[in-house]
Amino acid sequence: MKPEEPKGFDATAWTPEQAEDALRAHGCRVTQPRVAVLRALLESGGTVDAPMLAERAQAHQPGIHEATVYRTVNVLTEVGIATHVHAGHGPALFRLAGDDGVVAVCRDCGAIEPVPPEAVDTLIASTAKANGFVLEPGHFALEGVCAACAA
């Protein structure tokens, strides 16, 4: 169950202090490894896979293990700071809660790019018009081939 967000709160604008307070409010300890992963996620500026998140967390906590990153990002997901995105057979993708934009993932190199919101809106509208099905994008990534790999 996702915790209720305060009215007017932009979940994509988490500060490290707000996120640490949210962890404490949910009874979670604020440890150095958790802070390292949290800061790496906040600095990512979008959707990131766990190996990249682990690499970025190294800057804040040298020697942090990838398993610790996975455990931490699962805690961040449970308390509503992060969400996960399914992307085919690749590694799990994570981003800040509130960032519900759709991403495309290259099946060859793993590059992650945002899908323009107007393209997503068109897809949602045309699907609803064609068969009444209301799409709720964001939890899954679109898969394809990036421009560099297609060349």
Image: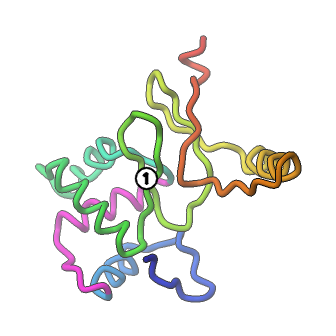
Q: Is residue 41 magenta?
A: yes
Q: How is the image coloured?
A: rainbow
Q: Identify which residue is drawn at 30% across, 79% down.
A: 23
Q: Residue furthest top?
A: 151
Q: Which residues are magenta?
A: 26-45
Percent position (x, y) of residue 129? Answer: 88, 51
Q: Residue furthest left?
A: 63
Percent position (x, y) of residue 9? Answer: 57, 82
Of the 4 image quadrants, the one containing the N terminus is bottom left
Where residue 91 sits, quadrant-wise, is top left
Q: Is residue 84 above or below residue 12?
A: above
Q: For mark 1, does the 10 Å Cα neighbourhood hold few (<14), some (14 to 19), or many (20 or more) residues? A: some
Identified by mark 1, the residue type is Ser
Q: Is residue 89 above or below residue 66?
A: above
Q: Which residue is mark 1?
A: 44
Q: What is the secondary structure assignment of the residue under circle 1?
A: helix
Q: Is residue 114 above or below residue 99?
A: above
Of the 4 image quadrants, the one containing the C terminus is top right
**Residue 112 placement, left or right of 58:** right
Q: Is residue 107 above or below residue 69?
A: above
Percent position (x, y) of residue 32? Answer: 17, 68
Percent position (x, y) of residue 118? Answer: 79, 49
